[in-house]
Image (cartoon, rainbow, N blue to C red):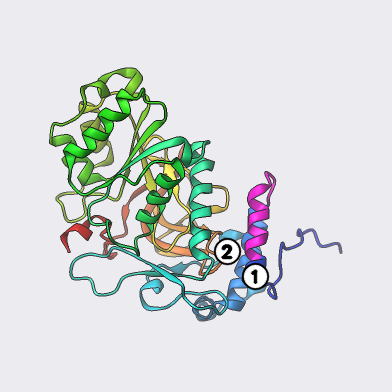
Amino acid sequence: MVDQHPAAPFDTEAGLADVRKAFMHGMKSSDTDWSNFALALFRWQNAHNDVYAEFVHHLGIDLRDVRSPEAIPCLPVEAFKHHQVKSTMWEVAKTFRSSGTSGVVSRSQHCLDDQGWAWYHHVTAASWQHVWRMPASEHQWLGLLPGYLGREDASLLAMVEEFMHQSGHPPRMFMRDHEAISSCLEQWIQEGCRKRMVLVGVTWAILDWLDAGLLPEALNNAEVAGQFVLLETGGMKGRGVEPIRQEVHEAIHRRLPGIQIASEYGMTEMMSQAYALDGIHQKFPPWVLPVVRDARDPMVQLATGRTGRLDVMDLANIHSCAFLATSDLAQHHREGLQILGRVDRSEVRGCSLLASE
């Protein structure tokens, strides 16, 4: 009988650099079979990642039974709190750490090898370009990320600072200086809004800025507003009751009716990001395979519109673990993936609480 399965892009004897090279080749091709890549990466990481291999063994899974990405077991992200999750042996050159919350002792740590820093920036730029259909360098950037400044282990800060560098503008990061933000926007408006402006901020800090009443009047001009994107990330963690996202958008649009509200979804344990151009429905690059599963039975995949626990297969996580069981609730929709919050009793990451530490 002829084997109908496509040849694997690499085998379990490949080195880390070889697998990354295969991934890069896949990114450049429009017809890459990412499902086939996922299966090859699963077998490779099971052979070279002690933490993941132990997890798979504990589940009693026969590798021969894993014939589709949906059958690949996903490692709970909590493993990153207690282990160095590494595929192959290498010295740790840099570590990203989750923000955590006040009183939380353990934080997730995502270790990077000596090529990991450059790899991260390559993947984040590619994720942005795939979803937004233009490079990050074609925008101007402002950051409203209280608590991140000065933290060399914050992956979000590293991404935004690199995007600023690529745009050719000096870093413009702010804690709570609302006047300085508005001054930057005034200058951008006076220069003719030649590039679209993206303000990246945690939700509560954005709302504080809006409440300060220092918005440039020109942002109410339809032409100017059409060049302005408010990119929210995180939420209200520790800053009050978590509002419904629609309520947040309504509050923003009452003050800035013509702007685009978008959102970013990512985590310390992932190299890639998703973006919701409408602020609600997240779109991932093709090498990220999100799966919504029944929280009571992690091997049951849920249909469109049903709420379940989100698993993310980020195939750019070659050096660590690509197959992640998150603590987020989500639904698949035709428009994209909707993130609904966190699983009950799941520890809050606290990306917005850095400022309180």
- Helix, strand or loop under label 1: helix
- Vertical position of residue 14 compared to residue 338: above or below: below
Type of amino acid at the residue the image marks with label 1: Asp
Type of amino acid at the residue the image marks with label 2: Ala
Give the number of the disc on residue 36. Answer: none
Whether residue 149 sits left or right of residue 263 in the image: it is left
Percent coordinates x, y for residue 178 in the rendering: 17, 39
Percent coordinates x, y for residue 219 in the rendering: 26, 24
Measured Cα–Cα span from mark 2 to mark 1: 8 Å
Q: How many marks?
A: 2
Q: Quadrant of residue 24?
A: bottom right
Q: Main secondary structure of the magenta part?
A: helix
Q: Which residues are magenta?
A: 19-32
Q: Is-magenta flag for residue 28?
A: yes
- Residue at 50% x, 48% y is 125
- Helix, strand or loop under label 2: helix
Q: Dot 1, how many residues are within 10 Å of its Cα: few (below 14), some (14-19), or many (20+)?
A: few
- Whether residue 243 is visible to the viewer of this picture, yes or no, is no
Q: Residue furthest right?
A: 1
Give the number of the disc on residue 65. Answer: 1
The residue that mark 2 highlights is 71
Q: Nearer the viewer, residue 54 or 231?
A: 231
Q: Nearer the viewer, residue 219 or 66?
A: 219
- Residue at 51% x, 40% y is 135
From the image, which quarter does the N terminus lie in?
A: bottom right
- Whether residue 83 is visible to the viewer of this picture, yes or no, is yes
- Vertical position of residue 345 compared to residue 238: above or below: below
Tell me whether circle 2 and circle 1 mark residues in contact (CB < 8 Å). Answer: yes
Q: Is-magenta flag for residue 92?
A: no
